[in-house]
Amino acid sequence: MSAHPVIVAIDGPSGTGKSSTSKAVAARLGMGYLDTGAQYRAITWWMLSNGVDVNDPAAVAAVAGKPEIVSGTDPLAPTITVDGTDVAGPIRTAEVTGAVSAVSAVPAVRTRITELQRGIAAGAPAGIVVEGRDIGTTVLPGADVKIFLTADPEARAARRSGELRGTAPGAPDLAATREALIKRDAADSGRTTSPLAKADDATELDTTELTLEQVISWVIGVVEDAGRKQPRS
Ligand SMILES: Nc1ncnc2c1ncn2[C@@H]1O[C@H](COP(=O)(O)OP(=O)(O)O)[C@@H](O)[C@H]1O
Ligand SMILES: Nc1ccn([C@@H]2O[C@H](COP(=O)(O)OP(=O)(O)O)[C@@H](O)[C@H]2O)c(=O)n1
């Protein structure tokens, strides 16, 4: 038994395997799971649905406190609602994907969502795997385990494109997906407030040549090692 519920932070750019890995690790270790990207997508969906100009940071900041975002943390059935509406599907549209970097760069949005994330992590009785862009650096700098996943843009675009083709008829082709992904990485890495970055004490894993199962096993190994090193209660 560890002294406190274990907190695992998994960061990295799009298509590196954060969501699939985090869900599987959490499920196998009996922990909670939080997709922070889904929360930024949810607030972006609300802005678009309410006619807010997502390219006007002041307009976004003025209403950043309005939507109530609730995340369910069961890794086998994660949920996300905005003001009680299930938005799991709508937050994955190309429109939301195209607007999310602008909305998530607004400091008032980040403050609000970061508070929400810290509350969820602090209230996770069995520990939690939290995935995103700034979890190890900003949201949970004291996390027990910090992992930063990377992969070549080609591999990431191919994975994302394959996924979109499976779920969204008329999805953009590989080149368009690659271009959109690189643009979003640059915006997320270049923003002033809490950019996408590897924490100094995070362990990096390049997943380009690895199967998902290999990545999952490696992360579980790192989490179990950290558990062994913790002081016993
Ligand atoms: N190591 C891997 N090898 C091949 N495909 C992978 C690997 N990791 C993830 N995938 C696939 O790539 C897609 C994107 O993975 P996802 O976990 O959503 O990445 P992220 O959360 O980092 O954007 C999914 O379809 C997933 O099944
Ligand atoms: N911790 C986080 C997580 C996501 N985000 C933002 O939310 C967007 C969507 O995140 P996501 O994890 O759903 O992205 P994908 O991995 O699905 O491509 C990112 O491109 C970032 O702009 C963020 O700013 N901080």
Image (cartoon, rainbow, N blue to C red):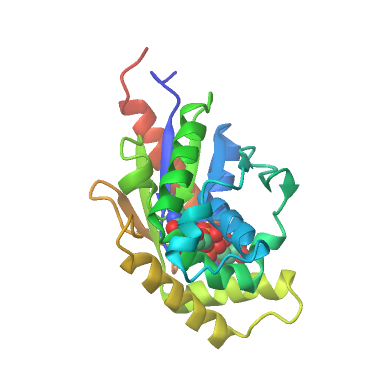
Work out whether 27 lies above or below 216: above
Quadrant location of residue 152? bottom left
Q: Position of residue 97 (x, y in %)?
A: 57, 69
Q: In the visual, does 213 lie left or right of 49?
A: left
Quadrant location of residue 194? bottom left
Q: Position of residue 66 (x, y in %)?
A: 58, 47
Q: Position of residue 33 (x, y in %)?
A: 56, 40
What residue is shown at x 58% (from left), y 65% (from top)? Answer: 52
Q: Position of residue 22 (x, y in %)?
A: 52, 47
Quadrant where the N terminus sits is top left
Quadrant where the C terminus sits is top left
Q: Residue furthest top?
A: 233
Number of marks: 0
What residue is shown at x 46% (from left), y 41% (from top)? Answer: 220
Q: Nearer the viewer, residue 138 or 157?
A: 138
Work out whether 34 lies above or below 31: below
Q: Nearer the viewer, residue 83 or 90?
A: 83
Q: In the visual, does 20 lie left or right of 56?
A: right
Work out whether 155 lies above or below 84: below
What residue is shown at x 48% (from left), y 32% (from top)? Answer: 119
